Amino acid sequence: MPGEKGSYRSVFSSIWDDPEFQSFEPITIAVFFCLRTSRDCNFACIFPHYRSTLYERIPTATPIQIDAGMDALINAGWVRYERPVLWIVKGLKNDPAFVRNNSKQTLGIINALKALPKLKIVEEFASYYEIPFTTHDTPSHAGIHTPSHTGIDEGIGGAPKHGTGTGTGTGTGKGKKKDLRSTPKTSPVDNSNPVDNSTGTDGEDRAPTGPSSPVPRTVDPEIQRLREVIEQRRAELGLVK
């Protein structure tokens, strides 16, 4: 965990004896150590970077000088840059804490790579260090079931609903709703042979279909009671003639 002075960065002291490193200009060396010890640099040494941050951290040099130092590192192969991802090529390899084939370190590196944009430089890093990671890894959608919506009146998840409507017979009762797609066409009614409809197909009596006397109108008992109360009140007040 970072202390009060930030994260700790370790570099082998033999870097000062490297002939190529000794050939770099002072600004190139300054840019390298600024990148390697930056708080943006992670354990894997591949991280998002914007050149403008170097301008702020090396205020004694001009942006042109800093860009020249960065370009020298890129041309020498010490650094690779595909905006906005920067990779210090041998940064992880030369870190004293790095242990190859350490499963915990490998998992941490993979998590760091997942947070980066899907660029070619990320795959190049994984190939260089033989990390089992590719930017083309995407979650598989195979096996996800999509409910069918071809049926009529389907419920949640495509399950058919069961209602209390009229069944396929002439009687009424609880049953499944009738599938309108399978309803047979009705044949024309042949009136040449009159049929007695007084009895239904289920054996129940039917009212005659011919002319009949009007059915007496039924008065609601509550309304009738109110009428009687009103008439009684009118009689008490002398309003009845």
Image: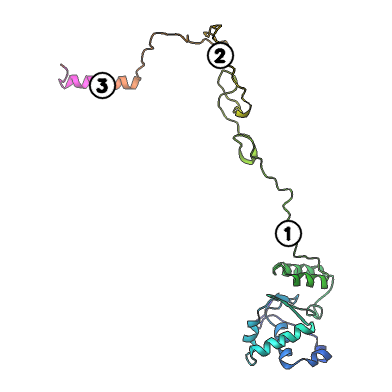
Q: Which part of the image, by quadrant, shows the C terminus?
A: top left
Crowd rating for badge 2 (residues with CA inside 10 Å; few <14, some 14–19, many 20+) = few
Residue 210 occupies which quadrant of the picture? top left
Residue 237 occupies which quadrant of the picture? top left
Identify the residue position indicated by label 3 in the image: 229
- The answer to the question of whether label 2 and label 3 lie on touching residues, with beta carbons closer than 8 A, is no
Say which mark, if any, is on residue 231.
Answer: none
Crowd rating for badge 3 (residues with CA inside 10 Å; few <14, some 14–19, many 20+) = few
Callout 1, which amino acid? Answer: Thr
Say which mark, if any, is on residue 189.
Answer: 2
Identify the residue position indicated by label 1 in the image: 138
* Vertical side of 70 occupied by 26: above or below: below
Residue 61 occupies which quadrant of the picture? bottom right
Secondary structure, mark 2, is loop
Residue range highlighted in magenta: 231-240
Can residue 10 be seen at all in this image of the molecule? Answer: no
Q: Which part of the image, by quadrant, shows the N terminus?
A: bottom right
Disc 2 to disc 3, how far (Cα)? 54 Å
Can residue 73 be seen at all in this image of the molecule? Answer: yes
Disc 3 to disc 1, how far (Cα)? 81 Å
Secondary structure, mark 1, is loop
Q: Earlier in the sequence, mark 2 or mark 1?
A: 1
Callout 3, which amino acid? Answer: Val
Seen at 75% across and 82% down, the residue is: 74
Q: Is residue 185 left or right of residue 130?
A: left
Q: Is residue 140 left or right of residue 179?
A: right
* Vertical side of 131 occupied by 205: above or below: above
> Residue 202: x, y in percent?
58, 13
Q: Earlier in the sequence, mark 2 or mark 3?
A: 2
- The answer to the question of whether label 2 and label 1 lie on touching residues, with beta carbons closer than 8 A, is no
> Residue 201: x, y in percent?
58, 12
User: Foreground residue, 22 or 6?
Assistant: 22
